[in-house]
Each structure stands twice: as structure tokens, then as C-alpha cells.
Image (cartoon, grey):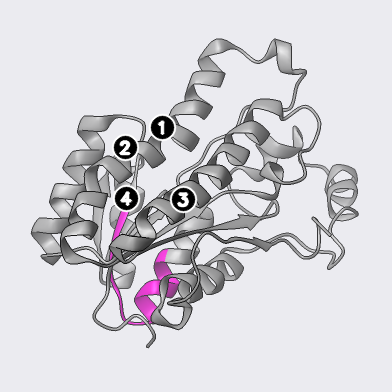
Amino acid sequence: MRLTGKTAIVTGGASGFGDGIARKFAAEGARVMVADINGSGADTVAAEIGGIGCEVDVGNGTSVQAMANAALEAFGHVDILVNNAGITHLPQAMEYVSEEDFDRVFNVNMKSVYLTARSLVPHFKERGTGAILNVASTAGVSPRPRLNWYNASKGWMITATKAMAVELAPEGIRVNAINPVAGETPLLKSFMGEDTPEVRAKFLSTIPLGRFSTPEDMGNAACFLCSDEASMITGVAMEVDGGRCV
């Protein structure tokens, strides 16, 4: 019960890695807001873990502020923020990615980190404590071809994590990231372009441990970094990738 008494917001919590993180946090004693653009999915996961659901567009400032307000009203305070919501564009040459797809990647993967900080960092500063976890990617460390703007967005998130950590450390706020490799999530097919045994085998051949990341893997890593056990850890982008970036 490493998170007993803690409250947390997990964006993109209705599926994939966010679902795994939300379930792990609840199992470790936290009260969790499951926030997702899929409001019904968020409500379903929240009901299963004894949390609360919230429909949010993480790329929209008004929506993010409403999420923060709802969490504060429900919990009284927020201890942990997990910026997990993410999107990609389909694998293709960088010059052929549409402006619409680029803007979606920018808003969901990058602008969201700014918006949640704008809404919740003042609260963390007022309390003199808080933990922020950004779910980045191995793509930000070791980019794969044909996912150029997704790679770049995750590299941005890693740099933002380190910059936030340095600035917020004197305020008692820790900021870390985790870098998953591709996993069994709704985004897997988008990363691969097509989901066939041959494409999966090629993907897995780049991961020394020989398997995809799971939501449980991310939940375990996130729980540690957001718990008091990691009280001396900030500015870290932890690779949870089966050795892919070695």
C-alpha cells in the first residue's frame, strides 16, 4: 500500500498504459481520477477501481482546467499527476504527415503537459509537495524511421521533464518520466502500420527481452516513481523497454 492517502490524476486512463497505471495506483491505496477523452471508458475503469471518471480533452485548456477543478473538488487536494494521454501518426515519410495529424500529436503529446502544469503546479507549490510523471517513449531516445513527428514529440516530453524537475525541485515537487517500448495497447497497430505476425516479429526482434511492454509494467514503474520510496529521484526518464535502448 505504497500510495495510501495519496490522490492521483491519470490522463489517458481508460485504456492501455494509463489503465495499468490507474489500476496499480488504486491497488496501492491511492484515490484515482481516471481522465480520458473517452468519457464512458474512463467511467468504466473508475468504477472498477473505486475511483472517479472524467472526460477530458488534454489539448484544450478549458477542458484541462475543468478536470483539475473536478479533482480538487472530489479529493480536496492532488498529490500525483500522470500525463499519460498520447497519440501518434501512422508510419510514413515525414513530409507526407498531414498538418492535421501533426497538430493532433502536438496537442496531445506536448501541449497537454503545459496545460496540466498550468492548472496544477500552482496547487502543488501551495502545498509544497507533488509528483508529476510524464509517459514519454523510447521513441524520444532511439527514434524509429517513419514516425518522425511522434519521435520528436516524445523527445520534447523528455526534455520538458528534466526542465520541469530542475525548476520545481526547490518547491518540493518531483518530475520524472518513463519511456516504454511499444506495448499491447490501442496504439500498437498505429506504430506498426499493420498488425501481422511478420511485422510483430520484426518489432520484437529489436527488444532484447523479446516481448512488448504491458500496462502492468508501466503501472509498477509509475507506482515506484510516484511513491515516497522515490523521494530522492527527480528529472529521470526511466526506460521500461526490455533493453531496446541499450
Secondary structure type for disc 4: strand
Q: Quadrant of the N terminus?
A: bottom left
Residue at horizontal 72 percent and vertical 61 percent from the top: 241
Q: Earlier in the sequence, mark 2 or mark 3?
A: 3
- Whether residue 13 is visible to the viewer of this picture, yes or no, is no
Query: Nearer the N terminus, badge 4 or badge 3?
Result: 4
Residue in front for this viewpoint, 36 or 244: 244
Highlighted range, magenta: 22-34
CB under 8 Å between discs 4 and 3: no
- Which residue corresponds to mark 3? 84
Task: Please report whichever mark, 2 or 4, sits nearer to the chain's N-terminal start.
Answer: 4
Do the CB atoms of the residues marked 2 and 1 lie less than 8 Å apart?
yes
Circle 4 sits on which residue? 35
> In the image, residue 109 lies at what x, y percent?
49, 37
Is residue 63 shown to the viewer in this render? yes
For label 1, the residue is 111
Looking at the image, residue 136 lies above or below residue 130: above
Amino acid type at mark 4: Ala
Q: Is residue 244 above or below residue 155?
A: below
Kind of element beneath mark 1: helix
Amino acid identity at mark 2: Leu
Label 4, label 1: how far apart the Cα atoms are: 16 Å
